[in-house]
Amino acid sequence: MTRLSIVIPVRNEEENLAELCSRLSAALEKMGCAFEVICVTDVNTDNTVGVLRALHQADRRIKMIKLSNAFGHHAAVYAGLAHAAGDAVVIMDGDLQDQPEDIAKLYEKMQEGYDIVYGYKERKNETWLRNFFSRAFVGVLRWLSDYRMDFNTCMFRIISRRVVDAVLQFKEREPSLTFIMGLIGFPTARVLVTSGVRAHGRTNYGFVRQINLAISSVVSFSTKPLRLISFFGLFLSGLSLIYFVIVLVQWSVFGIPVAGWATIIAMLALLGGMLLFAQGVAGEYIARIFMETKRRPLYIVEEQLGMSDFSKPR
C-alpha cells in the first residue's frame, strides 16, 4: 500500500484546520492510501497550536511540527519534508485554496511515471494585480535564469521520494523550493486543479513577502542582473564618449560654445541613480553570501506531535 505524507505549513489557521483535516481524511481514505498529515507551524497569534493538539488527540494521523521562530514559509515546508516518510509527499497550503479532493488527480498523474506533478489553476481567486505580477514574475525569472528549468509558483504538488531526498541535499538559507524542484529536472507534469477560496481569516503571504520571495528567487537562480548592469554601464560609457566627441567637434570646428548645464545635471542624476541601483543589486548578492557563510540552521524544532507513529526524522 502506498504511503502518503501531506506537508502543510500553517500559521494563524485555527478556523480552517478542522475542515481541512476532515476533508483530507475523507479524500485520502477514498484513495485507499495510508497517510500522515504533517502540519508545520511556528509563531501564531491565535490558537492554531491548540487546535492541532486536539486534532492529533482525535486522529493520530494528524501530526504537528512546531518551529521555535518564524523561519519562513519555505523553511517550514523544508522541515516537513525532512520528517516525512511517505513513498510520496503532497505539499499544499492550509487555507483551503488548495482542494484536498484534487490530491487524487495529482496522484493518478504521478502513476504515469512522473516524479513531480503540480497543480495549475486557470484562474486564481486573487486580485487581477496579484495574478498579473505572478505571471510576469515567472516570465522574467525564466528569461533571467542561468538554467533551463520548469518555473511554476504553485506550491500544491505531489513529489516522489527521490525528489524529497534530492531537495534535502540543498542547504540554502533561503530556499525557494518550487524553483529548486524545477532545477532538479526530474520528470514533471501538471494537472488542472480547482482554485478554492479561503474560508476564514486573511492570507499570511502579503504583497511585501511576495516581493521578497521574488528578489530572493532571482538572486538564487541567476547572475544575469550583474551582467546586465555591466553591459548597461558600458552602453552609457559609449554614449558619453560619443557625446564628448560631438561637443568637441562643435567647439573646435564650428566654434559653437559649450553649453547645456541642465543636460549635465540630468546626466549626473541619472548616473547617480544607476550607481545606487547597481550597488543595491550587488548588495543583494553580497548579503546572501554573508548569510550563507554563517551556516545557521534553516529551522529549529520546538515541539513535535506524533512523528514517531509513522516516520522518524531524517
Image (spheres, rainbow, N blue to C red):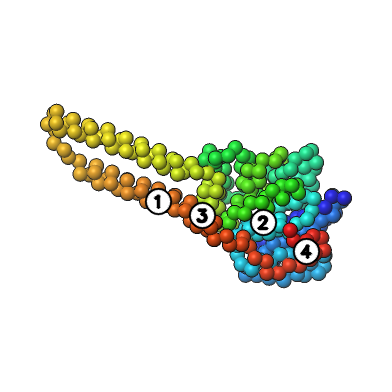
Measure how far apart labels 1 and 2 are at the Cα level. Answer: 32 Å
Q: Residue at x 50, y 57 (%)?
A: 290
Amino acid bearing label 4: Met
Label 4 crowd (10 A; few <14 / some 14-19 / many >=20)? many
Sequence-first tag of 1 and 4: 1
Which element type, helix, strand or loop, lies under badge 1?
A: helix
Label 2 crowd (10 A; few <14 / some 14-19 / many >=20)? many
Q: Quadrant of residue 60?
A: bottom right
The residue identified by callout 2 is: 78
Measure how far apart labels 1 and 3 are at the Cα level. Answer: 14 Å
- Asked if residue 126 lies left or right of residue 259, the reply is right
- Asked if residue 267 lies left or right of residue 299, the reply is left
Q: Quadrant of residue 249?
A: top left
Which circle marks residue 288 in the picture?
Answer: 3
Q: Residue at x 54, y 40 (%)?
A: 146
Which circle marks residue 307 in the picture?
Answer: 4
- Asked if residue 159 lies left or right of residue 204, the reply is right
Q: Residue at x 30, y 48 (%)?
A: 269
Amino acid bearing label 2: Tyr
Measure how far apart labels 2 and 4 are at the Cα level. Answer: 15 Å
Which circle marks residue 279 in the picture?
Answer: 1
